[in-house]
Each structure stands twice: as C-alpha cells, then as structure tokens.
Image (cartoon, rainbow, N blue to C red):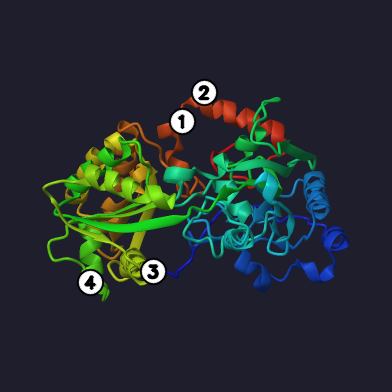
Amino acid sequence: MYAKLAVCNVWCEPLNIPIKKFTDIVGKNAVYTDPADCYAYGYDNSLQQSTPEVVVFPTEHEQVQAIVQTCYEQEIPLLARGRGSSTVGGAVPIKHGVVCSFEKMHKIISFEPENRLIVVQAGIANQAVQDHVADAGFFWPPDPSSRDYATIGGNLAYNSSGPRAIKYGTPRDNTLGLKAITGDGKTLKVGVKTTKGVVGYDLTRLLIGSEGTLGIITEATLKLTALPEAKHTLALYYQDVASAAKAVSRIMAQPVIPCALEFMDTTAINMIREYSDVPMPKNAGAMLILEVDGNEQQLEHDTQAILNAAESSALFETQLAKNSAETKAIWATRKALSPALKKVAPKKINEDIVVPVSNVPALVQRLQHLSEKFGIKIVSFGHIGNGNLHVNLMYDPGHPAQDKNALPCLEAVFDLVIELEGTLSGEHGIGLSKLPYVHKELSPQVLHTMRNIKQVFDPKNILNPGKIFNL
C-alpha cells in the first residue's frame, strides 16, 4: 500500500542533451537514454517520481568533472544520485535533465589506521566502510538505518547519522575533508587529513548537508573511531509516555552518555502488539532502548549511572541483555515497528523533527494533543537522546475528515517544533517534502544569504535545482 509513486508534475522545455559528449566521457555502456531504463533513477524512498532524460555512470572524479562541465556549458539540470534512499524527494530530478549515478564509484582509495582515517569514493555503501575498517578495530560513527544500502555520498549530502549520533556525532563531526565539483565544473579539495586545522572557511561542513545543491562530492576523508571494548543493551518499559520522556531528560543531564537511546510511544507499542509476534509487557505505555559502550572495567559503573537517572515510579520493567540473542530480541521490538506501520493506514507522512532534549517531554505530550485535535493517529519513535523523533501521521485518504486534516496537522507539528526551539529536520533533509515549510525556521535574510552562496557555487543553478529553497 506504500508502493504507489507520486509523479512530480513540473513541466520543463525539452532539453537538447548532447548524448555523444556523455558517451565520450564514460563510454556507450555507461549512458542510459531509454525512458524505461531511466525511470528507476527518477524516484527515491519518498515515492515521488520524475524521470531523467539521461543517466550516466562515472567511475572516476575526472569523469564526473567532465559531466558537470558539459551540463554547465549546455545549462542542463544535473542531479548526483547515490542509491535513492532519501525519504524527502532529494534524489528526484524534478527538472528531468541528467542523473549522475555513483553506483560504480565505490572504491576505497586509502586506509590509514595510524591516522585514524579512510579515503573513499562517494558511491561506496556505509556498511562496506564499516566492514573494511572493523578488522583494524575502527568504525565510522554515522549509522543510518539504511547503512547496508545507502552510500557515503548520500550520508554526507543529508548529514544522515542514525542512533550513534547521540554520543559520536553526525557526518559533519566525523568527516575531515572532501573532494567535490562545483556547478561550473571546478574541483574543490577542502578540509584536512588532521584532526586540527583552521585555515580559511570550513567548506567541508558547508557542503555536508547541502543536498547536492552546492557541489557534487566525489571523495571523502572520513575520521574513524576506535571500536569500544564492550557494550550493554537495555530495554526500559514505562507506564506512560510522559514518564519516559522525563527519564530521557535526566539521562542526558548526567555525565555518562549512552551510544544509543531510542524511544517508542504508546501508539507504536500497541501497533507492535497488534501486528507482530514480538512480545511486549502488558502495561507498557512507552519504551526506551539504550546501548552503553566503552571500557570493559568501566561499563558496569556507566550502565548503573544511566539506570539511576532513568529510575521512576512509572518504570516497571528493565531488561539487560546477557548475550547476543537477548540483544537481538530487544532490537527486534524496534525493527517490528516499520512493518507494523504499513498495516495501520493506507498513507503516512513521516517527519524527523528535533527539539532540545529539555523540551522532549513537552513535545511528546503535545503531539498527543494534536492527534486528538485533528483526528489523525500519530506514531512517534526514534533517536530521542538527541531530541530527534520520527513523527508519523497515519491517515486514510479515502476518509474525508482525515484527508482534509492531514496537512493542517503536519503544519501544526512543525509550528510546535519551532515553538519548542527545534528544527524541522534532523537527518532526512529538506528535499521536496519540506520545501513549503522552510520559511518557518529560516528568516528571509538567512534564505537570501543562502541563495547568494548557491549563486557562488552553482552560477547557472544546474545542481539539483528546486531543492532546499526555490530560486
């Protein structure tokens, strides 16, 4: 029921695309022009669709540069694509044009354990990087749920992080440098190979999270972290959502930081009960999943410190996994949620909002009020230790009241987030889905400054046009 694509009805003049120039760059077998072949490169996980006219498959930085230069000369819209796991339409080429697919750019350029870094092409999967460095005792902290599939370039384009960000930070915090190509076809090599460096503006952090609108990232120098010696996984069950949210604030106010802190609200738990065979305690109204990692000798102390902070009269059950099977069973609860969501309503709106941790209790309480006000079932779960919740509005378009109230409810959610000093997106980006709401967070002066920056990096507005803001 979630597989139907929404076609982006953006009309564009037919483009006079010089196919031969692209085949000269990458070879005939690395260029798609048949609409049937190109169709699959016109949508992402947002299920919005707009078919490109050409798809090219480079293998080297120099080929990407030549592709960009050709598009710049001909003023052809160009979108860099990883594996299309964006949930907001960021990988949808709404101006058609050319899609530059990075699926063949998956090399490891160098691995330097002594410098705690790895240099990779942008098309390599996140999990492939993790697997490569694990034997040497390292990991790259960003771990989005799509890590088996999503590319490093896509992670960087959206600053996608996952649950470990609570302790280890986002891609911006774990990337030393980049090689990228601006919209006029010039190569930028930005950043450093050291953990210190303050020469000039920090263009590395500017490019990360820019959704491919300022430059096309071809290579990344990633900062690695040593794997922890040991890890504890816990499940905490509370009688109600408010008590769990308050416990999160207490946990984050003490010195020991968990490496993961996930939350599920009452509606999410009831859905798991109804639509899966994963066991849940009878009185559970909210659930926290925590992971604590670190030195083996310190781990017991750190785990107890977190449990002390989480203590509440509403906390009625605590599970500490004793082995890998029990750890898997705890996380099975979280993994059961996505399949359950698909059985609840014909349509959902999924947003990844963030508020300061101190405002999490107010957020979860007022989301319940919005659900009642608009008659829309709201399911909340996610990386609550950062204040980052995935808020799902579940509704039936065939139900007149729900269809009418869905978007007003979404706008009310965004207004609530801004009121609570939060942000509209934690890791999914803006893409197309959040474009109408950006003005709620960014002032006209800020947007004006961003447009000026865009003009410097992409003078002809060919890079992923129509994303983040309208020009």
Give x and y (percent) for residue 378: 26, 54
Mark yes or no: residue 10 visible. yes
Dot placed on the residue nearer the N-terminal end, 3 or 4? 4
Disc ID at residue 176: none
- The secondary element bearing badge 3 is classed as helix
Q: Which residue was labeled with disc 3?
A: 324
Disc 2: which residue:
445
In the picture, which quadrant includes the N terminus? bottom left
The amino acid type found where label 4 is placed reads: Pro
Please give the name of the residue rendered at 78% of the width and 44% of the height, measured from the top-left corner: 72
The mark nearer the N terminus, 3 or 2, is 3
Q: Picture coordinates of residue 282 (x, y %)?
A: 13, 66
For discs 3 and 1, the disc positioned in front in the rendered view: 3
- The amino acid type found where label 2 is placed reads Gln
Could you give the CA–CA distance between mark 2 and mark 4, rounded to whole angstroms? 52 Å
Q: Please provide percent x and percent y for residue 143.
A: 50, 55
User: Is residue 366 visible to us here?
Assistant: no
Q: Residues under labels 3 and 4: Cα distance?
A: 18 Å
Name the secondary structure under disc 2.
helix
Q: Badge 2: few (under 14), some or many (20 or more) residues near its Cα, within 10 Å?
A: few
Circle 1 is placed at which residue position? 442
Between residues 4 and 80, which one lies in front from this camera angle? 80
Residue linked to disc 4: 279
Q: Mark 3 Cα within 10 Å, few/some/many (few <14, many 20+)?
A: few
The answer to whether the residue labelled 2 contacts the one labelled 4, judged by CB atoms less than 8 Å apart, is no
Rounded to the nearest angstrom, the CA distance separating label 3 from label 1 is: 45 Å
Q: Nearer the viewer, residue 299 or 352?
A: 299
Mark 1: amino acid: Leu
Question: Going by the picture, which residue comes out furthest to the bottom?
Answer: 277
Q: Work out which residue is located at the far right of the displayed protein and give it.
A: 24
SS under mark 4: loop
